[in-house]
Amino acid sequence: MQAVFFWLFSALAVGCALGVVFKKNPVVSAVFLMGSMLALACLFLLLDAHFIAVIQVLVYAGAVMVLFSFIIMILNLPQEELPPLALGGTRAWGVAFGAVALLFLAGKFFPTKEGFMPTSRGFGDVRSIAVPLFREYALAFELTSLVLLVGIVGAVLLAKRKV
Amino acid sequence: MWIDLLIVTCKVLFMFLFVLGIAGILTWVERKQSAVLQDRIGANRASIFGVRMIGLFHPIADALKLFTKEDFVPLHGHRVLFVLSPALAIVPALMTFAVIPFGDNVHVLGREVSLRVSDINAGVVLVFAIASLSVYGITLAGWASDNRYSLLGALRGAAQMFSYEVVLGLSVIGILLVYGTLDLNEIVRAQGGYWLGFIPRWGVFVQPVGFLLYFTAAFAETKRMPFDLPEGESEIVAGYFTEYSGMKYAAFLFSEFCEMVLVAGLSATLFFGGWQLPVDVARGLALPLVGVVHISGLWVPLLQLLTFCLKVVIFLWLLMQIRWTLPRFRYDQVMSLCWKVLLPLVLLNIAVTAVAVLAVKG
């Protein structure tokens, strides 16, 4: 049962990710990206990581992607086809870099002799995320929020200059 | 295994029938209640063999009419997304009910069954996560319609829902701090009993400001008057669903009603004791003349379900009353209300609640 769902949502995630790259319409790409994120959330659910799954939906699918599609619609890019790539070598470089990244990831994540570590009970629920986040990594957490604040202030500053 | 599957199927079916059934009746309530408010008679024409049932057949007549209407798809829009958007609007509205409990756990067939579809331990956050997806239905509908009014409505809708989502999410943090859990069933259990023997231990008495902020933000999320800027008939025709006809149009209408049911259900669960009965089950109900009536067996979950439904209905009445009382805001008023008034208030509420909880619990 779990394996069926795992393969279903994995296929969905990968398929949607391919859709993001191959579709030329930015709004359709955004929808595919949303689908991919939802499939990822379902995979987290299968791992009993309820809270991570919910946050995945809330933050990425529900907030970040909404902003993306909002911006795309405001810009309202013309529907014309993308211009053919002028540099013949660009595509080859892209494929090469992609292959290297894929190999690296495969080496990291494919089952080794020891196999995968099973997740512990309660992995990814609210408590098991909140306690380390606000105890051990409290400083890093606060510093990250500071970085985000700097980003917001910078964005406002850049936008205001035009007015 | 099979019995578990059967139980889950039953719960899912019940939830769908509950939400869709109420949403269907709400189409009638909307017309009738507005009529009463405006001193009219309201919908009363639909009849089956001369039986009119105070217009209760109108939802059926409407459904038949909408199914037989022309299904129009704009020529230059995006066909797939145009067809997909109504589904994207209505599915999140229906899914969110999965974690709302209809009653306490019951013992059936030798196992403990919780009266809600899913026992995900991040209950409240799941509701907001799925509800946040309903923005896509609106924005994509407006974009795929290839119509300026639709696009304007979509952009308004996206901005409005996005802004009020922030307030909505933060407004329940207070109640989560007080009860120390994300599980909606635990929150309802903590609201049982009375203070001083007569004030129910409802969340609204602990978090009055939180409730008002939640209710305002949730109301804005339903996109109904006075927050119906994404539609704004007098300015942008019908906003994001200008180009929609037939049952696709009805799907948007229905998703709005389903969201109302959700807002009502969540208000009852978080702030008004959910399924908690107004009597002490262990001691029984003392009635004058009759004596003490003991509630036992399957009566307990049935009465809990009834209590929950009653609370939902009362909130739906309130939502309707507000919708037909207040005129529409201006768009900039809606946005400045959210970011300049509600957001500071909700942050203040969290800070005050956190200090109070720390002071009480030590």
Image (spheres, grey):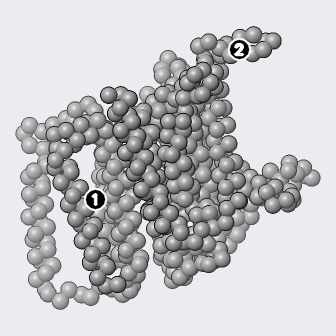
CA neighbours of label 1 inside 10 A, class few (<14), some (14 to 19), many (20+): some
Q: Point out the image quarter for the C terminus of chain A.
A: bottom left
| Chain assignment, label 1 | A
Q: Nearer the viewer, residue B330 or A35?
A: B330
Res B291 seen here? yes
Q: Is residue B38 above or below residue A9?
A: below
Q: Where is residue A152 drawn, in percent x and y?
A: 28, 67
Q: Report x, y in % for residue B219.
A: 57, 55
Is residue B132 rendered to the left or right of residue B317? left
Q: Which quadrant is home to the N terminus of chain A?
A: top left
Instruction: Name the residue: 21% across, 58% down.
Output: A146
- Is residue B252 in sight in this rendering? no
- From the viewer's perspective, is residue B288 above or below residue B41? above
Locate residue B172, reporting x and y percent.
Answer: 45, 45
Residue at the disc numbered 2? B286
The amino acid type found where label 1 is placed reads Val
Name the one closer to the observer, A81 or A1: A81
> In which chain is the residue bearing label 2?
B
Residue tagged by mark 1? A14
